[in-house]
Image (cartoon, grey):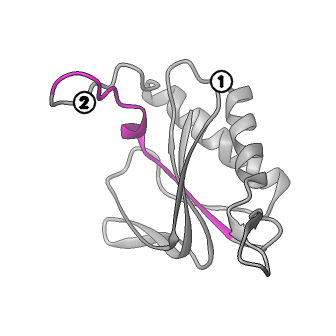
Amino acid sequence: MKALVQRVCQASVSVDGQCIGEIKSGMMVLLGVEATDTETIAEKLANKLLKYRMFNDEAGKMNLNLTQVDGELLVVSQFTLVADTQKGNRPGFSKGAPPELGKHLYQHFIAHIDTQYKACKTGQFGADMHVSLINDGPVTFMLEAS
């Protein structure tokens, strides 16, 4: 499971021209689920995400996590994060979870966050989405759990 995490001033996701999730200051997370992922892996990554120190303290150092700054969270599924790009000019998707498993683990990831922090905003699994954001910094990290 991979999460591309961006510190944002604002972010939103739309489906068919309708905004379905929007946040102000916080984290925008693009989440990729692999075929070998489990609920335990999803929980481990969710825990890491909530504790990850990527927000500035008073001295301008990245010492604070999402909960410490009371930030908002937007999670969007993105199967292309787990693409194999090592050979050729076309990505391979054999490592990606089948849709049913991917959706289950995406929802489990979000439900686990909701038990520990305020409810996060989400995209729509499997939909053609338009994502907008203003990256703060820019600050972007790739987090993985296995």
Residue farthest to the left, as pictured: 89
Provide the secondary structure element on which disc 2 rests. Answer: loop
Type of amino acid at the residue the image marks with label 1:
Thr
In this rendering, which labeled residue sits more in front, label 2 or label 1? 2
Q: Position of residue 41 (x, y in %)?
A: 69, 29
Quadrant in the rendering for residue 19: bottom left
Tell me the number on the disc at residue 46. none
How far apart are labels 2 and 1 at the CA level? 24 Å
Residue under numbered circle 1: 38
Q: Is residue 85 magenta?
A: yes
Which is more toward the observer, 70 or 115? 70
Secondary structure found at label 1 = loop
Q: Which residues are magenta?
A: 72-88
Q: Residues within 10 Å of mark 1 (few under 14, many from 20)?
A: some
Residue 91 disc label = 2
Q: Is residue 35 magenta?
A: no
| The quadrant where residue 85 appears | top left
Q: Is residue 5 above or below residue 11?
A: above
Residue at 59% from the left image edge and 24% from the top image edge = 37
Q: Residue at x 70, y 69 (%)?
A: 55
